[in-house]
Image: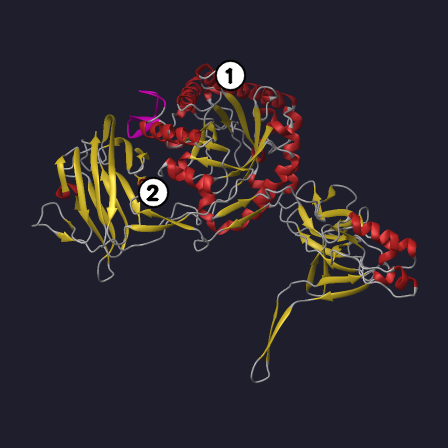
Amino acid sequence: MGHWLATPAAAKVFGHLKRFDARFWSVNFPRPMMASVVTTGPDSVRVDAVFYKADDLAGLIWEAEDRSDHPLLAYETDRDFRGCRLRFRWRSSGIKGLDAIDGPTLTIEGRDAAGQPKSWYVRLWNYATGAPDDATVAIDFANLAGGFLLPDEADPVWAGDIDRLFISLVPPGYSGEAASFSAPAEGWAEISGIACDGAGSVLAIGETLVPEHRLRMATGYDDLYHLTPARLLRNIVQLGSRNEINHYVGMSHYFRLEPLGSGFYVSLAGSALNISCAAWHRDFLARAHALGISVILSLSYELFDAHCWNDWKQRTEAGAPALTGWVPPSTLLSPAHAGAMNYLQAAGRAFAAIARDAGAAVRFQVGEPWWWVTGDGQICLYDDAAKAALGGHPVSIADVRQPLDAAQKDLLDQAGAQLAASTASLVAAVKAEVPSAESLLLVYLPTVLDGAEARRANIPIGWAAPAFDVLQLEDYDWVVAGNVGATARGIAEATERLGYPIEEQHYFAGFVLRPEDRAQWAAIAAAAEAAQKHGTGSVFVWALPQVLRDGFTWFDNKEEAMEAFHDVRFPVALGREASVEPSFSTAVVTTASGAEQRNSDWADARLRFDAGPGLRGEAELQALIAFFRARRGAAVAFRFEDPYDHSSHGMTGEPEADDQPIGVGDGLRTDFPLIKHYEDQVRRITRPVAGSVRVSVDGVEQVSGWILAAGGVVRFETPLPTGAVVRAGYRFDVPVRFAEDRLSVSRATFAAGEVPSVPLVEVREP
């Protein structure tokens, strides 16, 4: 298995598409309104929008530069539209008509012929034939003008350097003022029969097809609502994830809103979902089902704070609402508040119904339900509804991470029971809509295991198998910090507490929040591979927006992997007299003046051995032949003790716990790979001898609290304090293979004293 971060120039396989292809339009708009875009045919696209204010405006967008697709799948950047002619049919309802002031306008953003930034505002009605809500629009970019009235107000467009263009959509009550409508205004617009011809109408597009693999994809509506489902699924399928999608329906874009004072709050008036969200998910689930992709719909207890009713929010003992670290923040719904839970149940039923109506199996995830714990350890179970459910006057818990007394532990147990009851009711509501629905539970381990007693409230025993069909675990904070030990402990604790076998678990690896941290993908890929090797039912990468942004690409080895290493040592007696040749690869160029330019290709020497000199009789020759056949010649690597360098203490001395510095603690890290220093050159040690490793921290030998993990990694049970110096001593072997697939030995020449050559070569290991 492996991964690759593709760059924008990495695509090597290309196809072609027509400019203005329906799949590649997008939408954008200001809060709190909502809009979505779906393809209704190969040459048609529809926008569904809900407006809450008199200044709400949505844009149907075409970008000259593809910034939304994976680098291997993006279309080429071509900012010159001058040779293009675009034609489409316009239909709309609940949107200002083409003939109206503030009616649909084509805004073109780019630069003029002199290279100065400029925008043009092209009134579509000036290029339309038909009615204001049903017309044919024809645009020749070489002969196009902005302005309301033509020719008097004509502003000629120079279409040679365009960044993007968008068609504006506003409600009939649009005035440009921020006044709220008394009720939401819903509308739609469709452009169909999209045709573009002329020079520049055809674009190259990446068509890389990654082989199907076992790593599943996770998505999130809050980050992808502006793209067409057809576009998202194209990326997922082309990137090799063709079996399963975990789709978070989000916390900020799926709901309906109602005005109150100067704000807007989630509402069940009309239905649980706004029309834009419902239209997008109908298309998404139908397309995924047609592709044979199973979708898990994830609904969490998290809600955009600005739109959440105040009495629905979890609160600290001081009354502060539970707020996440996102900007703007989200809040957590109280599991004890009937109104909040009824709202979640209505949303769950609505999403389940959409999946059912698409013909898909309904798979419903309760995503990350918990009593929020603030950064300073305050647990948010003191909202009015929770206090009433927990006896009226629950005891104080100032910091859930500190030792607690019996009354405080009892309170956490009660809170856990309340949380478990709320998730059971949510699942029951979904099953009332679709009795065959599968239930899944997603638990975010770094939060729910923060403090020895927090799990009483946030991993309640009421979740134990078989309360859910599948347990899903996530731990990206630990993964990107390199805290592998915490991952192993967390999964083990959740498994022991809840009792789901590993094959009934899913694991989520990721995510990389900022593009400048893309190096974290290596740790994410390693965590995903470890979970697969552990036998986890399904492993997901979180999430598609970051995958597309950073070019993350995953590969499985589809052929049955041949065992590449046998953890056995070359017969010691045969290797004791071996000759050794450390070698580097250095390119040397001599200039005309006689000066040399040298470039070292390898950071470390590669060893070659000849074990022939160690043969001392026919019995040893037979042992060599048997060992060679068992390794299938050069196919399988094995251990070899370098007779001249096999210890951390000098070259062959007895190891001590402080022989080699291997790292410094940072408060998060648990893994410290073994290394050996040769002055300023560092050698990675991947095959230490079992039982020989000794470890010290700040000069004190550690006889417990750590294990030796695969690959020569010292893994501590808990992260070491910042600045703690870790040292280790050990004996080690070199991973080698036979250099050739044949072994030439003659009984006659061997008996006559001729020593055969048995070349071995070092194998590089990560």
Residue 394 part of the magenta segment? no
Q: What's under tag 1, amino acid-wise?
A: Ala
Q: Residue at x 27, y 50 (%)?
A: 201
The crowd level at tag 1 (other Cα within 10 Å; few <14, some 14-19, many 20+) is: some
The crowd level at tag 2 (other Cα within 10 Å; few <14, some 14-19, many 20+) is: many
Q: Residue at x 56, y 84 (%)?
A: 592
Residue 683 at x, y percent in the picture: 70, 59
Q: Nearer the viewer, residue 496 or 218?
A: 218
Residue 617 at x, y percent in the picture: 92, 58
Residue 250 in view here: no
Residue 461 at x, y percent in the picture: 61, 21
The circle drawn on residue 24 is: 2
Quadrant of the image containing the N terminus: top right
Question: Based on the displayed image, in which of its 4 quarters is residue 158 positioned?
Answer: bottom left
Who comes first in sequence, dot 2 or dot 1?
2
Question: Based on the displayed image, in which of its 4 quarters is residue 185 positioned?
Answer: top left
Query: Which range of residues does the magenta coloring cover?
Result: 256-272
| Residue to which mark 1 is pinned | 389
- Left/right of residue 186 with respect to residue 131 in the rendered view: right
Residue 271 part of the magenta segment? yes
Q: What's under tag 2, amino acid-wise?
A: Phe
668 w.r.t. 456: above or below: below
- Left/right of residue 14 with respect to residue 390 in the rendered view: left
Residue 83 in view here: yes
21 w.r.t. 580: above or below: above
Residue 334 at x, y percent in the picture: 47, 23
Q: Residue furthest bottom?
A: 593
628 w.r.t. 25: above or below: below
41 w.r.t. 439: above or below: below
Q: Secondary structure at mark 1?
A: helix
